Structure formats: structure tokens, C-alpha cells
Amino acid sequence: MNSLQFNVTQSVLNDPHFCTQLDQFLLQNSVMGSQRFKIVTCILEAVANIQQHSQHSLEQVSLILRCERDKVTIDLLDNNPHKPLQTPHCPPAFSPSGRGLWIMQNWMDQVRYQGTVAGSHLRLSLLRN
């Protein structure tokens, strides 16, 4: 198992190489192209959701990306109070929001969101082809 960890900060997100680093890590672990696209997109959507709905700064968000033989797991941990997520439905075409969670639910094999002692934990898993 190989893993990559980031403390997500605004400067990390503003770095044009952030997505490239994620993609290169996945490529080095033989993750197929379409799966790499889905994983990186879901990470960006999840971080954007944290940033949009958070009362805290991104400096308190940890991202852990793990590649195992049979799956890729993404863990996002933050110190925001846990709020239950609504079951996502396909948003209207011109809706300004609501796509991120729907995309995650449809592209990932597992989406789990739960409270922790320190805040919230989002786990996304994708089985490898």
C-alpha cells in the first residue's frame, strides 16, 4: 500500500501542480486514466464543499490518498462539526450548486461521511479495474 498525505491549505489548492501531483501519484500506482480523472475530480469537489460550507479555514483539513492492490481510498478529515448529508439527486442543469456530492455518489464505489472526535471524516473508495 502506498499513500500520499497533504495538509490542505489555500496555497496548496492554488498551486497549479496540486492536481498533477495527485495524478502522478495515481499513475505511479498503476491507476487507469479514467479512474485517475474521477479520483482527482472527486477530491477537488470534496475540498470545495469543505471550503464552501465550513466555518474554519482549510489549514485544518487533511487529505490522505491510499492506493492498495484492489482499491483507491481517499480520506478527508476536518474539524468542522458533523452534519448529516442529504441523499444527493441530479441537480437541475442550471443549478449553481449540488453537483459535487452527486458526482461523488455516482463515480465512487463507497462514500461514507461520519463524525469524529475532532470533527468530520469523508471517505471515498474506488475499486480498481
Image: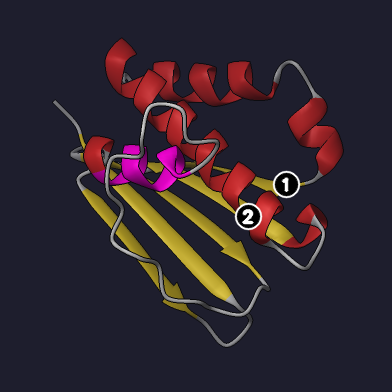
Residue at the limit of the structure toward the bottom, as seen here: 117
Q: Residue at x 40, y 67 (%)?
A: 85
Q: Which residue is drawn at 53% across and 50% down?
A: 64
Residue 127 lies, in percent from the top left, at 18, 38
Q: In the figure, 76 relative to 96: above or below?
A: below
Residue 72 lies, in percent from the top left, at 32, 40
Residue 38 lies, in percent from the top left, at 36, 26
Q: Can residue 32 be seen in this view?
A: no
Q: Residue 8 carries which label?
A: 1
Q: Is residue 99 magenta?
A: yes
- Specify whether 94 is left or right of 70: right
Q: Which mark is residue 50?
A: 2
Secondary-structure class at tag 2: helix
Magenta part of the chain: 98-105
Residue at the limit of the structure toward the left, as seen here: 129
Residue 120 lies, in percent from the top left, at 54, 72
**Which sits in the foreground, 29 or 36?**
36
Counting other residues with Cα less than 10 Å from the Cα at mark 2, is it few (<14), some (14-19), or many (20 or more)?
Answer: some
Q: In the figure, 126 relative to 129: above or below?
A: below
